[in-house]
Image (tube, rainbow, N blue to C red):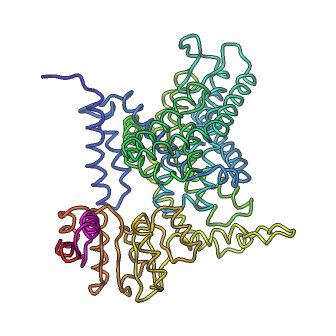
Amino acid sequence: MNHDIPLILTIVVGLGLAFVLGTIAHRLKAPPLVGYLIAGVLIGPHTPGFVADQDLANQLAELGVILLMFGVGLHFSLKDLLSVKGIAIPGAVVQMAIATALGLGLALWLGWSVEAGFVFGLALSVASTVVLLKALQERRIVDTERGRIAVGWLIVEDLAMVLALVIIPAIGGVIATHGGEEVIGDALVAEPGQSVWVALGLTALKVAGFVAFMLIVGRRVIPWILHYIAHTGSRELFRLAVLAIALGVALGAAQLFDVSLALGAFFAGMILAESALAHRAAEESLPLRDAFAVLFFVSVGMLFDPSTLIENPLPVLGVLFIILFGKSLAAFAIVVLFRYPVGTALVISASLAQIGEFSFILAELGVGLGMLPEEGRDLILAGAILSIVLNPLVFWGVDRLKPRLERQRIFAGAGGAQAETGQLPPQPTPAEREKADDAAIVRASTMTGHTVLVGHGRVGSIVGDALRKAQVPLLVIEDVDRVATDLHNHGVEVLHGNAAAPAVIKAANLGAAHRLIVAIPNAFEASTIVQAGRAANHGLSIVARAHSDAEVEHLRSHGADIVIMAEREVAKGILAEVLPAPAAREV
């Protein structure tokens, strides 16, 4: 029996092929997203074989962007955003202007019009938030000052793109009409004959109205809803509430205020970040965020025509040069001129050395308005694919470049901004804050005979507090940004990262440790940590937790000495209260 199921086919084939190629990429020591992009190319219209539904893939990818931006908001408070406005706003504006000028120059060299060059350059000037966040999260620097500047920088770029979606149709003078209003994507554009400045002013008012609504109404209603649902005790309803808030606010922002879906979701998360339930909300939305982020990369791959690399090699190299070097060097110079450390400048530069979702929207808009030739869209897509693939190498390169630049005399004063004067205590300079951030992320421990505790959640926090009161030498490995920062601020030696990562395990100095306690609930990830611990120290005492007999056996087979099954211990506690002591001990 034949079924017309394009949605199911798109999801199943997209995720399935992304899984296979992502696994191969991982085995080859390449980022899995390289496999996701190639999967998109293989199921796209420009390669033979199965062709997925492009429109459905784009909508699924948009869901991923919404959920990802919601997650960013959960880790990025309004205070954090305002704290970096001094560098993020002027830096993003100047960097975008420089990149747009470079793109315009390349377009004129190719024989295009000034209007085409403007759209082309603007598309090359804005980086992908999805790619940036994955890079920052992998390096555990989202909550550092460098991470906040990078995210704030991209938020300014996103706001600029919202305005661009209004200005460009007004400049082009060609409007796509939909139901009496002219709509491009999720941004309201100018009516025929309307002044560009009027359209720009209206958009600014709508964005301001949305922000005011979220600060006045959303700040009270969103946390109240989640607290109410949390008190019902239903995890299913709580998860549903988180998703409904993220998607609902994003859609409401687009429909009522003409703000982009991504920015709407970001503000929803940022408002919720002030609630005590922010960490739990982030956990509940994480699986769907990851799945739809994969579909985003697959959808990008579907747009790419590989023949562009052969037919237009020099223009492709020119685009890649602007993205990887033009934007990055401009950002580096701007950040250093603002007297921030070289390390911060390099992180910002690497973060911007790629383009993504807004570039695709702008390219499609330009082609649809007749302002940009189709060749321009193909070059933008080629630049996006290649820059996303090369972005991890850029980060690797700046990590190697940082020590050399820091030794140069020309950068000796960077980051040494004067502390504020007055009766307040001296504030740390940007360089001092960067050094503190590095120390709080991952550093090799020099402890010996210590206990390593993996996870400081509901179980781990109880264990950790008891060990600290007993004055047991303790090192905690924690991958939740705020928890790790809080532990560090309270004088606890902490490694900020995923304990399954080899670099983190090595930094924990397990070879000289006395005991390893794995308090995370995920048995699959825990077994990897247990196995690494046993390989590092054959005499190490390893304690882990499980939720079933199968998990107990699995952890023991990987090297755990003692495995505590939570349900069994709860049952023992109950029986200890209702049965005589001898009978309870027999359980």
Q: What stretch of residues is rendered in magenta?
A: 556-580
Quarter of the picture holding the N terminus: top left
* Residue at 16 percent of width and 22 percent of height: 2
* Residue at 41 percent of width and 32 percent of height: 58
Q: Nearer the viewer, residue 118 or 265?
A: 265
Q: Nearer the viewer, residue 437 or 126?
A: 437
* Type of secondary structure dominating the magenta stretch: helix
* Residue at 37 percent of width and 35 percent of height: 302
The percent position of residue 44, horizontal first and vertical second, equals 33, 34
Residue 47 found in image quarter: top left
Q: Is residue 405 visible?
A: yes
Quarter of the picture holding the C terminus: bottom left
Q: Nearer the viewer, residue 578 or 438?
A: 578
> Magenta span has 390?
no
Residue 202 found in image quarter: top right
Residue 420 found in image quarter: bottom right
| Residue 521 left/right relative to 496 | left
Residue 32, relative to residue 166: is it above or below?
below
Q: Is residue 382 visible?
A: no
The percent position of residue 197, horizontal first and vertical second, equals 75, 25
Q: Residue furthest right?
A: 422
Q: How many marks?
A: 0
| Residue 420 left/right relative to 223 | right
Residue 208, relative to residue 239: is it above or below?
above
Residue 541, relative to residue 428: is it above or below?
below
The percent position of residue 155, horizontal first and vertical second, equals 61, 44
